[in-house]
Amino acid sequence: MPVDNASLGRHAEPCQQVVKQAIHWLLRLRNNHGNLRLNRQCEQWCAEHYEHELAWQRVQSLQAELSHNLCAVPGAQVAFHTLENSAQGLGRRQALKLLSGALLIGSAAWLVKDTAAWQQWRADYATATGERRGFQLPDGTRIELNTASAVDLHYTAQQRLITLGRGEIIVTCAGSDEGAPSVRPLRVQNRDGIYEPFDARFILRQEDRCTRLSVTRGRVVVHAGGHSFDALAGQSFLVDQSGLRAAPTLDMDAGAWLDGLIVTRNMRLGDFLAEVARYRPGFLNCATDIADLRLSGVFRLEDTDRLLAILPQTLPVQLRYRTRWWVTLERAV
């Protein structure tokens, strides 16, 4: 089945059909160990599109998790144990069927867990990987969405609620709602808390284990962990379901992405690449021996390949492109 690159390029995650193709390649390579021709064909398939590469990474990762009891998928461990220890007694088709069933169950669980593409499709406002967009809401409130972000609006006669499903948002209040903010208060909600602004401008960034709140104007009342806290202009906090705590000082400008920039101040290379990776599909990483190198500067986001090409000019590193979407940095030799 031909792959529509224009269509797939709009999504940050591989579709289920591509995941199944990756599983098929894994099964073929597993049962033809040492076949160099088959390995080259798989590498060519991975290079055809970033979704292929990403699906291949995820399926390999899933296999490792299942093999080491790190992923509790019903039936998967039995399948792998049987395949590893009783392969001699299984016919090729039986082994393929057994392993395929385990991987399909696991990949289905992964697809359900990783809902970025689904959230983007169903959200009221959303951005794809690398995309940044601004929206004016019905009450005059302005929201800016960073890369791979999604929000829903719940505006009724009683409330104005913005729900951040994923990603990062800048909210700029339009002032009171027809002179009666207590009648229809504006609130922003995500998994970690509720944020009630008063003539404020603030940034919410939803991370893996917490949410970073940065207030640039006015006051935001944070409701989290069963308590309420005031966050004032110039303050930053980390919020989770236990409450909030002062955020460590960032080594980058929290809101520079609004202007299409990453502005760093003595930032670790490993952290910088993790930030750049948010704006491009595929895999981006560096060797551990250079992760602690530091860099400062202003970097433009519209072309992340060009951005990466600048790094060897200022740091003792070199770029390694396995494919267009799989990039690692190593120490220059």
Image: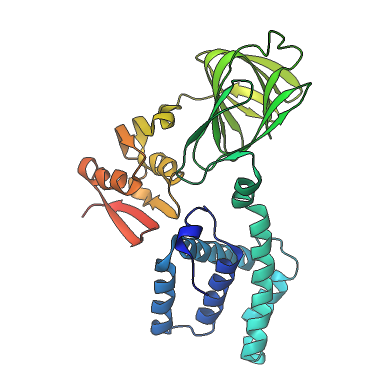
Between 5 and 331, the one nearer to me in the picture? 5
Residue 103 image-quadrant placement: bottom right
Question: Residue at the spot x=43%, y=48% of the render?
Answer: 280
- Looking at the rendered image, the quarter that the C terminus falls into is bottom left
Measured along the vertical axis of the image, is residue 255 above or below residue 201?
below
Residue 193 image-quadrant placement: top right
Horizontal placement of 275 versus 142: left or right?
left
Total labels drawn:
0
Tell me residue 303's x, y (percent): 33, 45
Tell me residue 143's x, y (percent): 55, 27
Color style of the picture: rainbow
Question: Residue at the spot x=65%, y=92% of the render?
Answer: 91
Question: Residue at the spot x=74%, y=19% of the render?
Answer: 227
Measured along the vertical axis of the image, is residue 246 above or below residue 102?
above
Measured along the vertical axis of the image, is residue 75 above or below residue 317?
below
Between 84 and 10, the one nearer to me in the picture? 10
Residue farthest top in this picture = 179
Q: Is residue 251 visible?
A: no
Residue 239 image-quadrant placement: top right
Tell me residue 172's x, y (percent): 55, 20
Measured along the vertical axis of the image, is residue 3 above or below residue 147?
below
Question: Residue at the spot x=40%, y=72% of the render?
Answer: 43
Q: Is residue 11 visible?
A: yes
Tell me residue 188's x, y (percent): 66, 26
Between 223 and 185, the one nearer to me in the picture? 185
Horizontal placement of 236 versus 250: left or right?
right
